Image (cartoon, helix red, strand yellow):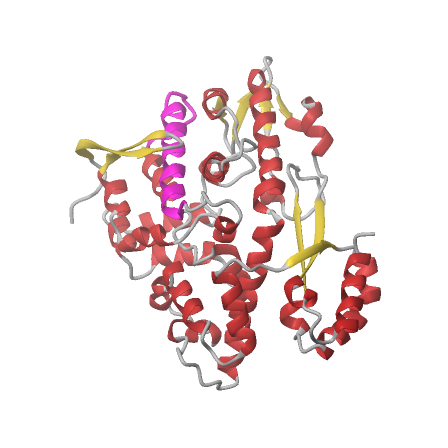
Amino acid sequence: MKRLDGKLTEEKVFKDPVHRYIHVNDELIWELIGTKEFQRLRRIRQLGTTFLTFHGAEHTRFNHSLGVYEVMRRMVENLQKKSEWDPDERLVCLASALLHDVGHGPFSHSFEKVFHMDHEKWTRHIILGDTEINAVLQKMGKDFPTKVANVIAKTYDNKLLVSLISSQIDADRMDYLLRDAFYTGVSYGQFDMERLLRVMRPMEDQAVFKHSGMHAVEDYIMSRYQMYWQVYFHPVTRSAEVILSKILHRAKELLADDYPFKITPTHFKSMFNDHVTLKDYLKLDESIILYYFQAWEEEDDPILSDLCLRFMNRRLFKYVECDPGKQMVIWPELKQLFEKIGLNPDYYLVIDSSSDLPYDFYRPGEKDKDERVPIHLLMPNGELKELSRQSDVVEAISGKKRTDHKLYFPKDLLEDESTFPEEKRRIMSLLMSQEG
């Protein structure tokens, strides 16, 4: 078997709107891109339901994965000039960056919540299982797929390499902030990536940044903060996610009750029964999901039909800001009123919460150390200083978790007072009291 540690006879180039060009010189990377498991990512959007809010957000996990590879390629190119970098790790690094998201399912995080799945686990299954990707990686040596899987699992021996793809400032985040900002048409996610790469320095366990580049790091942290609240947690996107998850929950419930589907959810059966094989999982993409949603518009079950019509035609739920304390007081009456007017509150009255921690660092005695490795600055005298101890901007948001709660409901049905007018007015009154 020919090893894939050589160079292509001619460089392959992908034209990219974010990085201008994505350069591929390695046989290994070129063959991985051509595998069917990687090509599947063309059929999975990077931002799930966000296209219903920002119409340009049609980019895919394929775009993003190539972008992360390119950022990593540039990182490695810079780091190879430093004595601390081990050149034998180069292809492990590039393959891990390229494949880090290969286990994502359709509509990504919404899909994971419904089926209690972890895309990183599926990524490792794909890398280590009976797949084209595994066959390509095996050409580098029997232990090479395990090395790549361990990087993604954050268990690889070389912690510097792990930090480049999974930390508070890594190749993954750098690409998705710039890419998502570009495709949604917003300016929040912009930061000076070239400057960050120039001031990055390898240490034993992680990459650090020269103190002179602190403002570029600050800019990156604030860009991430703004993108989460202006794009990723946008209330319209969340409304679409609520409806998407309720469709899947309803289909699962109906299947368990032996409901006679006009279009049987064949692709979902193993998901609903918690017996998902790798083959089943890899058959799922967003074109399959949307096929079922469109077909289910004609189902006799009124809830499934209505929810699918809403999702496919962007007739989304409205929302009010929700105070958890007030909500607990009015919740019993709200549920009772919804049931009286013929709306199942399990599907038509939904609380959704979002929270983000823009930057934090591990403190002794706390859990989740690996998730909060701090960003360090390399001072002129060679000392390392934690970012928030040097930056007033980052200190102001460090460790501050922001959370909001929204209550989603079908306002269009409540405004139709041809039936149950008094009950619907009372419901609207209760809902509006949340915002007071």
Residue located 43% across and 25% down the image = 84
Report x, y in % for residue 274: 48, 73
Residue 115 visible? The answer is no
Q: Nearer the viewer, residue 107 or 95?
A: 107
Q: Could you say where residue 394 lies in the image, as x and y percent from the top left?
A: 67, 29
Residue sitting at the far front: 418
Given residues 308 and 18, the one toward you in this image is: 308
Outermost residue on the top side: it is 380
Q: Is residue 242 above or below residue 157?
A: below
Q: Is residue 7 visible?
A: yes
Q: Nearer the viewer, residue 73 or 244?
A: 244
Where does the image place residue 397, in percent across and percent down from the top left?
Answer: 71, 34
The residue that appears at 49% across and 46% down in the rendered structure is: 154
Task: Give the image location of residue 298, x and y in percent.
Answer: 45, 75
| Tally of numbered discs | 0
Decide if residue 15 is on the left or right side of residue 305.
left
* Magenta region: 59-87
The residue nearer to you, when weighing 144 against 117, is: 117
Magenta segment includes 147? no
| Quarter residue 194 falls in | top left
Q: Is residue 70 magenta?
A: yes
Q: Is residue 400 above or below residue 396?
A: below
Q: Is residue 118 above or below residue 182?
A: below
- Determine the main secondary structure of the stretch shown in magenta: helix
